[in-house]
Amino acid sequence: MIMANFLKSRKSVRDFKKKKIDPNTLEELTLNLKEFENEEGSGNIKFRLYENGELLYGGLKGLGGYSGVMIESPHYILLELKNDDDKTIIYSAYYAEKLITKLNEMGISTCWVSILGVDENKKKEILGDDIVIVNHLLAIGYEKPKNPFVQDPFSERIGVEDLVFEKGLDRLVDMEDLETRGLGDLFFYARFAPSTKNLQPWRFVLDGPIVKLLIAYKDTERPLFEDAGIIMYYFEALANTQGIKNKWKLIDGNIKKAGLNYKYIGEYHL
Ligand SMILES: Cc1cc2nc3c(=O)[nH]c(=O)nc-3n(C[C@H](O)[C@H](O)[C@H](O)COP(=O)(O)O)c2cc1C
């Protein structure tokens, strides 16, 4: 399972070489960006290559990234949304992760960078007057070689046994049952997907041949729709390697359970 191996080793790179990506590769990449925009098809999502990484980094240093820790890279990709709908956010992240998979094949490393809190005028000043909504960027480039004597940072993941439920949110899935149904690997690898601050808000509910995807969230915050789109992409890609070619169908809904909120995102038929 190539996708499974990729996911298990996939990680955010935060230390990039200054070396720029060569113009031919950037040109190929620009074609890929267009291809993914077209495949998505709504016209609400634009991937823009920002070549002059130095300029962008200079402008967003101290502002972008978690707590203003901006990631420095030779180039960036802007994830531009034409509206703020849940669906637009979900599919922007779905295709961003498809793009990250492609970049990885090209030997290019990436890190998601949040610029949600950056002042809108500042964003326009740096990213261009004509941008509509840009809440995330992808830092892209070549990873700096690591010190072989220093342990790589590793982001822990929640176990399958705490992510997957049976029928409703009252009962966690029986792991043996999951294996018997041939679904153990699918969930084992899907949880290596990246998520905002590694919060892993995804919860799955098995209901016969249907998998329901929920996103746990706090009353005071908007559900992390990017994280939903990301896991939807990997879930489909992994299922595909097992011969299951279906796509997620979005469903709108909310579930409250034991004081916690869950946004109902969609269903997948196995
Ligand atoms: C929507 C989104 C926004 C993110 N924003 C940032 C960010 O601003 N800065 C950062 O260092 N990492 C960011 N990340 C990376 C996550 O923190 C990272 O994927 C997660 O901790 C898991 O680590 P891994 O990607 O190395 O497996 C973001 C990830 C996602 C999905």
Image (cartoon, helix red, strand yellow):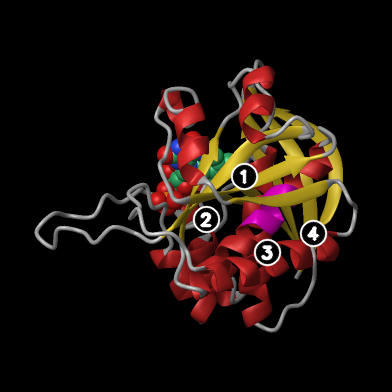
What residue sits 63% from the left and 40% below the top? 170
Which of pointers 1 and 4 lies earlier in the amino acid sequence?
A: 4
Span highlighted in magenta in the image: 91-96
Considering the numbered disc 1 on the image, is that residue within a helix, a strand or a loop?
helix
Determine which residue is flagged by label 4.
37
- Alpha carbon distance from label 4 to label 3: 11 Å
Can see residue 209? no
Amino acid type assigned to the residue bearing label 3 in the image: Thr
Q: Nearer the viewer, residue 201 or 3?
A: 3
Determine which residue is flagged by label 1.
227
- The crowd level at tag 3 (other Cα within 10 Å; few <14, some 14-19, many 20+) is some
Q: Main secondary structure of the magenta part?
A: helix
Amino acid type assigned to the residue bearing label 1 in the image: Asp
Instruction: Look at the numbered discs 1 and 2 and tell me whether their residues touch, using CB distance below 8 Å.
Output: yes
Mark 1 Cβ and ligand 1 under 8 Å apart: yes
Q: Nearer the viewer, residue 46 or 124?
A: 124
In the rendering, at what x and y percent does residue 99 appear?
A: 63, 62
Residue sitting farthest toward the right: 42
Considering the numbered disc 3 on the image, is that residue within a helix, a strand or a loop?
helix
- Alpha carbon distance from label 1 to label 3: 24 Å
- The crowd level at tag 2 (other Cα within 10 Å; few <14, some 14-19, many 20+) is many
Q: Is residue 151 above or below residue 219?
A: below
Residue 30 circle label: 3
What residue sits 68% from the left and 20% below the top? 120
- Alpha carbon distance from label 1 to label 2: 9 Å
Pair 4/3: label in front:
3
Considering the numbered disc 2 on the image, is that residue within a helix, a strand or a loop?
loop
Q: Is residue 190 above or below residue 63?
A: below
